[in-house]
Amino acid sequence: MVALVALLGLVAGRYVRALAGAFGDDPDDLRAEGRAALAGALRTVPVPAWPPTVELATAAVTALTAWRAGLPYVYLALAGTALAIIDWRTFRLPDVITLPSYPILALSLLPTGELPRALLGGAALAAVYGLLWFVRPAAMGLGDVKLAGLIGMAAAALGWPAWVLAAVAGQLLGALYAVALLVTGRAGRRTEFPLGPFMLLGALTAFCVGV
């Protein structure tokens, strides 16, 4: 099963590449950009580009997620990979991907029997990030708050220890990256960097540990 998911992830990675590459830094019309990005991704021929870094990364993330957490989490692995790439490139987490992911993820988690806890976990982590955003709006964006809800849903479905690990690991990985930038002199104390990829890595950590 894991090998099949990895193969499907390799194919899906081509669509992830096309979707992620269609978003820019500061579009004039967010809705038009989103429609064009989705339409362009659907027209993509599923042949890996060269070098196939995105395709291989997508295959690895989806296979690892399916192996450690289960098939209900594969959708978040695919959407999360696209969001991580977009956020790293543009400092944005587009609503056109994040918001529809809520009902899709809820349907994916329904067979687990843990949907009520997942919804509670999503609301709780979104509330935590919402508070952080309210206190320091310069430190993160509302896109991070919306992403936190998705991560909270998926992690809570695995259990509250996984929820705590996903929440803490995302912040810790982001902090370690910031320290590394400071130590190497590549950034100052006010340098901004996208938090979304580290939040998603924290979620992947929780999936892999399977606490």
Image (cartoon, rainbow, N blue to C red):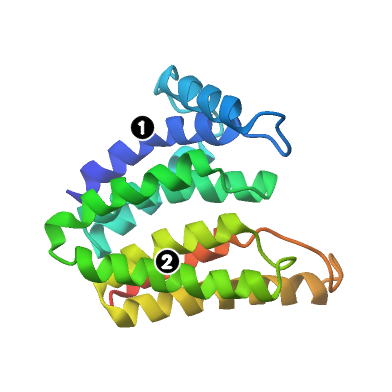
Local secondary structure at mark 1: helix
Q: Which dot marks residue 68?
A: none
- Please tell me which residue is depicted at 32% across the width and 57% down the height of the picture: 64
In the picture, measured across the screen, residue 175 lies left or right of residue 102, that is right
Q: Which dot marks residue 203?
A: 2
Q: Is residue 57 visible?
A: no
- Please tell me which residue is depicted at 29% across the width and 37% down the height of the picture: 8
Q: Amino acid at mark 2?
A: Ala
Choose between 68 and 27: the one closer to the eye.
27
Question: Would you call the spot at circle 1 few (<14 residues within 10 Å), some (14-19), or many (20 or more)?
Answer: some
- Please tell me which residue is depicted at 30% across the width and 51% down the height of the picture: 105
Residue 91, horizontal then vertical, whole percent: 68, 50
Residue 80, horizontal then vertical, whole percent: 45, 51
Earlier-in-chain disc, 1 versus 2: 1
Local secondary structure at mark 2: helix
Quadrant of the image occupied by residue 166? bottom left
In the picture, measured across the screen, residue 79 lies left or right of residue 3, that is right
Q: Amino acid at mark 1?
A: Val
Quadrant of the image occupied by residue 32? top right
Residue 209, horizontal then vertical, whole percent: 33, 75
Gap between marks 1 and 2 measured at Cα: 23 Å
The answer to whether residue 124 is above or below residue 138 is below
- Please tell me which residue is depicted at 73% across the width and 37% down the height of the picture: 26
The answer to whether residue 20 is above or below residue 147 is above
Q: Which dot marks residue 11?
A: 1
Query: Which quarter of the rendering shows the C terminus?
Result: bottom left
In the picture, measured across the screen, residue 12 lies left or right of residue 70, that is right
Tell me, yes or no, whether the two marked residues, 1 and 2, touch with CB atoms within 8 Å: no
